[in-house]
Amino acid sequence: MSVSCIACNSRETSLIGKLPVFTPDFLGQPLDESIDAGSLYRCGNCSLLFRWPMPSPETLLAYYGGLDKDEWWQHEPGREVWRYVEKELRHLPAPSVLDVGCFRGNMLREIGANLSCFGAEPSPGARREAEAHGITVIGDSIESLREEERRFGAITLIDVAEHLPRPLESLQILSGLIAPGGKLLIFTGTTDAISWRFARQDYWYCAMPEHVAFFRPSWFRWAAGQLGFRISSVKRLPYQPVAFRRRAKETLQNIAFIGYQRVTRSPKLAYVLLRLPMINRIANWQSCWWTSARDHILVTMTKDTVS
Ligand SMILES: [Zn+2]
């Protein structure tokens, strides 16, 4: 039976391969042999890549809701992508911004000084901290915003879109909350990055079980048409910029790790290679992160002024 696309429902999908897990647990549960992390599929209609089967939306939301405010990724003040978001927020039809998945509100605390700042966040601890810093938290999920009556000059999703089990439906809810001429800003991985095309299903970004949807610029062009928006900019960035030496080291390590995954899928080749001490060392690596790769995009979509 073919698998339907989680964005456009097309059955024109193809299997890329089984997905790895790099995290020490599986959404807070012990990681063992019985866990099915799912496989990576490509949609031939809208160009989305997605995990299937995936954890249920309820499981995902419960996992995010259970995150301690200090447990999640820490970001240095002045994260690179925030500078580009700040520029996009300078000219809005209304002086307000809603950050979906705002967590502790770090981004808006830094760049939202001239705007009314709103957030949506499932983690109660993180939500309280955001509110303590003047951010009005109006929901715990995109679903919870269905009845929202405010309209915002911009909505931001930074490291959020890849977590959406029904990405187009979620963007449809959000697009209704944006004032005419307002902006939807999305920062997420892009599957047309060279590193991703090389690694395919072995890529670090697919190895976190809560990452379920993987985009590229053509997907956003397709989605913009569905939503009544136009793409006003696409900026390519790494998840985390680092010095050249570390970037080169991560690149070489990943080429070795991914090459190893690929050749050892052939049992005969694995038998020979595992006898080579250098290769045997890679066999002990549980994971290989590549956060310095230029594999993210900041997409800015602008809502039509007349609908
Ligand atoms: Zn699709």
Image: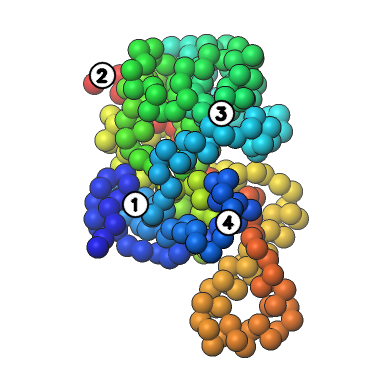
Q: Position of residue 100 (x, y in %)?
A: 48, 27
Considering depth in this image, is 231 or 277 the residue closer to the camera?
A: 277
Q: Secondary structure at mark 3?
A: loop
Q: Quadrant of residue 7?
A: top left
Pointer 3: residues within 10 angstroms few (<14), some, or many (20+)?
many
Left or right, 57 with respect to 160, comes to left
Residue 107 horizontal/vertical position (percent): 61, 25
User: Which-is-in-front pick, marks 3 and 1?
Assistant: 3
Label 3 belongs to which residue? Answer: 123
Of marks 4 and 1, which one's residue comes earlier in the chain? 4
Q: Is residue 107 left or right of residue 44?
A: right
Q: Position of residue 256 (x, y in %)?
A: 64, 70
Q: Nearer the viewer, residue 235 or 23?
A: 23
Tell me which numbered mark, 2 or 3, is placed earlier along the sequence.
3
Residue 2 falls in which quadrant of the image? Answer: bottom left
Report the amino acid beneath label 4.
Leu
The answer to whether residue 59 shows anywhere in this view is yes
Beta carbon at label 1 within 8 Å of ligand 1: yes
Find out if the beta carbon at label 2 lies less than 8 Å from the nearest ligand 1 atom: no
Residue type, mark 2 in image: Val
